[in-house]
Amino acid sequence: MATMTEQNALVTTVKSWPDRIKVFYNDVRTEMRKVTAPTWKEVQATTTVVVITVFIFAVYFAVIDYFIQHGVSYLFNYFKIHS
């Protein structure tokens, strides 16, 4: 069974929820007022960066895949011939 001190702490915690929720909600509203939507120029710039980065990674992984594929094929053929 919980002691009286533990029960009082629980009651105090539960009673403070409405105030804590109100403070949280006000903080969220304050921060959301600071948020601005990006300009069209910023959207275009970040989209360009993303597209170029995706293309670079695609080329990189294609090259790596090519070398791994041919390396594994070479190893399979090497051991097939020598076994």
Image (tube, helix red, strand yellow):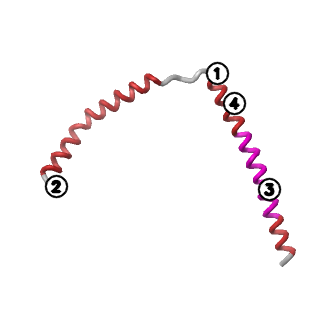
Q: Could you tell me the amino acid type at mark 1?
A: Lys
Against 69, is 35 above or below? above
Distance of mark 4 from mark 3, alpha carbons? 29 Å
Q: Is residue 51 left or right of residue 21?
A: right
Q: Which residue is mark 4?
A: 48
Q: Is residue 83 magenta?
A: no
Q: Residue at x 80, y 54 (%)?
A: 66
| Crowd class of label 3 (few under 14; some 14 to 19; many from 20; radius 10 Å) | few
Q: Residue at x 66, y 27 (%)?
A: 45
Q: Secondary structure at mark 2?
A: loop
Distance of mark 3 from mark 1, alpha carbons? 40 Å
Q: Is residue 73 left or right of residue 12?
A: right
Q: Could you tell me the amino acid type at mark 4?
A: Thr
Against 23, is 40 above or below? above
Tell me the quarter of the picture where residue 19 sits. Answer: top left
Q: Residue at x 16, y 49 (%)?
A: 7
Question: Which numbered disc, 3 or 1, marks the residue that appears first in the sequence?
Answer: 1
Distance of mark 2 from mark 3, alpha carbons? 66 Å
Q: Which residue is mark 3?
A: 67
| Crowd class of label 4 (few under 14; some 14 to 19; many from 20; radius 10 Å) | few
Q: Residue at x 22, y 41 (%)?
A: 14
Is the Cβ of the residue at disc 4 closer than 8 Å to that at disc 3? no
| Crowd class of label 1 (few under 14; some 14 to 19; many from 20; radius 10 Å) | few
**Residue 80: horizontal and vertical position, in percent?**
84, 73
Q: Which residues are magenta?
A: 54-73
Q: Which mark is residue 41?
A: 1
| Crowd class of label 2 (few under 14; some 14 to 19; many from 20; radius 10 Å) | few
Q: Is residue 71 magenta?
A: yes
- In the image shown, does 18 or 52 lie closer to the viewer? 52
Is the Cβ of the residue at disc 1 closer than 8 Å to that at disc 2? no
Tell me the quarter of the picture where residue 44 sits. Answer: top right
Q: Could you tell me the amino acid type at mark 2?
A: Ala
